[in-house]
Image (spheres, rainbow, N blue to C red):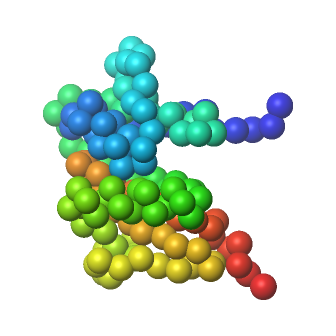
Amino acid sequence: MSVQLNHTIVAARDKETSAKFLAAMLGVPVGARFGPFIPVEMSNGVTLDFIDTGGESVTAQHYAFLVSENEFDAIFGRIREAGVAYYADPHHGQPEQINHRDGGRGVYFDDPNGHNLEILTRPYGSDSA
């Protein structure tokens, strides 16, 4: 068997709100609760399992999602429609812009916990000719 990422745990102040936000932006369903977790499953079977921090602060993490050009259009449309701030860079220095790294498109936005989310249409380094 090849090594594959199966799931990761995402800390949240409110796991339900956070899972619903990500699922709504990406256009994927929220899964059924599993123990203390609310999973959001990606098309490759990887789940992001949201868990409440119990009042502890959330350390922001970065989660990047490789999407098709059509998916990018749909997700970016939902981001804009929801009034979510977006940026061309991970440090949020280029507001209301997208990037065109590696001949594709990419954009960064935050979830309700401050996790830095990214959608991109080409993997980094894929246009290194």
For image coordinates 31% across by 59% down, the residue present is 79
Check the image and name the residue furthest to the right.
1
Q: Is residue 120 left or right of residue 116?
A: right
In the rendered view, tell whether residue 3 sits above or below residue 122: above
Q: Position of residue 93 (x, y in %)?
A: 31, 81
Q: Position of residue 122 (x, y in %)?
A: 62, 67
Quadrant location of residue 20? top left
In which quadrant is the N terminus drawn?
top right
Residue that sits furthest to the top in the current view: 35
Query: What is the count of numbered marks?
Result: 0
Q: Is residue 112 above or below residue 11?
A: below
Q: Is residue 98 visible?
A: yes
Q: Is residue 127 left or right of residue 29?
A: right
User: Relative to 33, does residue 73 appear above or below in the rendering?
Assistant: below
Q: Residue at x 35, y 61 (%)?
A: 77
Q: Residue furthest left?
A: 55
Measuring 38% from the left and 23% from the top, which residue is drawn there? 37
Q: Position of residue 21 (x, y in %)?
A: 30, 43
Apparent side of residue 2 relative to residue 58 in the rendered image (left or right): right
**Among the 4 quarters of the image, the one containing residue 118:** bottom left
Q: From the viewer's side, name the closer residue of 99 and 62.
A: 99
Q: Is residue 118 visible?
A: no
Q: Position of residue 78 (x, y in %)?
A: 33, 56
The quarter of the picture where residue 34 lies is top left
What quarter of the picture does the C terminus occupy? bottom right
- Residue at 34% x, 73% y: name it: 87
Q: Nearer the viewer, residue 54 or 48?
A: 48
